[in-house]
Image (cartoon, helix red, strand yellow):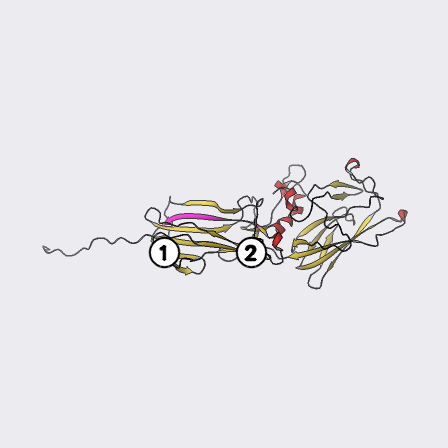
Amino acid sequence: MKKTNILKIFMTLVMAFIVTGAFAQVAGGDYSEYDSDTETPTAIDYVTVGTDHGYYAMPDNVYHPNYDAGNGWALTAGFVWNWTVDAEPNAGDASITYPVGGMPANYVEINYGELGNYTINVAEQAPLSFGGCADATPTVMNVTAIAAPTAGIVGADANNTWTEVTAGYEYYICGDAAAENLTITITETGVPAALASYAYSVEQRIVNIDASDNDIGGTETITPDFVDHTITGKYATATADGGSETVSTGAMPVVGGERTKYEYTIKTATDYTGAGAEGIISAISHKSDYLDIVADTQGDGGAGTSADLDITTYPFTGTLVVTYVVNPAPTTGPIYHIPNNFNI
């Protein structure tokens, strides 16, 4: 997913900056203004628990007149930004890291170690040569750390015609079968309905099997994108705390006169190229991976790009495969007997 798409669903796009010593460089168009009310904001920034996030504070334009592209985003030396994070009683401590020389610059990274609500405060302070003044009305930001997403898949016997061997996961029937429903249930406790969107896929596998349930070679057909909500085109449930999606298997006929198995496996979105385990990616968790893009992890010597982003997948829960087996009706062969002209 391009960096410019990661944060667009959360805020109106504006420019922000990263400090390097007495200078700053534009980080790109991904960062955007959180809330125009800097003292009593009402917006909430949602993050996945246990993840790191970067934040910028715009410097005072009186003291930093050269903070623009033409001057390399120069900051006046000696100024610091005092950052604090307050946690409500239901939340744990958050840790602040100062990537710019270990000093409290106008860019920090914060990790939220536990679920709950947090308040970020930041105040710019001048050096003694400028009177040592500190902003008496710090800029405030509200953050809520929510649980990581999970998801699972189950089948159904909507037509009441199947033998259910394992509830929700394994079904058998005689003859061609009508379509059934698969339900993907997603849990991301705390996410608002407007931000609940997810990347995952369902793979369909059709194969003939023998009387011992072994695959018959050469009969397999795989459709990896039977359901495919890509990282760049996530599925919006429009439901708080996660949501669900119901999809049809389509008709399931007996193929080639042999026992036929239809398998439906929930998997990572087909455009995922990382090395992580099969799992779901949400809009919030994807945003939580943003800092991984800052460094050039590919070793090509250039700035970090979307190709450098190592997206985190969160494991699916329960059984991952739903199986339907359609069986041809047995054909009764001729009767054999001892003939009347039998002679020992």
Q: Quadrant of the C terminus?
A: bottom left
Amino acid at pointer 2: Gly
Residue 6 x, y percent position in the rendering: 64, 45
**Residue occupying the point 48% across, 45% down:** 224
Q: Position of residue 301 (x, y in %)?
A: 67, 36
Q: Is residue 319 magenta?
A: no
Q: Is residue 1 left or right of residue 143?
A: left
Q: Which residue is at a point 74% across and 44% down the rendered structure image?
A: 18
> Residue 161, relative to residue 55: is it above or below?
below
Circle 2 residue: 243
Q: Position of residue 73 (x, y in %)?
A: 78, 40
In the rendered structure, which disc, 1 or 2, sits on the residue that comes first in sequence? 1
Circle 2 packing at 10 Å, graded few (<14), some (14-19), many (20+), is some
Secondary structure beneath dot 2 equals strand
Front residue of 148 and 42: 42
Q: Which residue bears the numbered disc 1?
A: 173
| Residue 243 in the figure: left or right of residue 10 | left
Q: Along the horizontal axis of the image, is 18 left or right of 306? A: right
Q: Position of residue 110 (x, y in %)?
A: 71, 52
Q: Nearer the viewer, mark 1 or mark 2?
A: 2
Residue range highlighted in magenta: 198-208
Q: Are marks 1 and 2 in contact (CB under 8 Å)?
A: no
| Amino acid type of the residue tagged 1 in the rendering | Ile
203 drawn magenta: yes
In the picture as drawn, the residue positioned furthest to the top comes out as 70
User: In the rendered view, would you say 116 is above or below 220?
Assistant: below
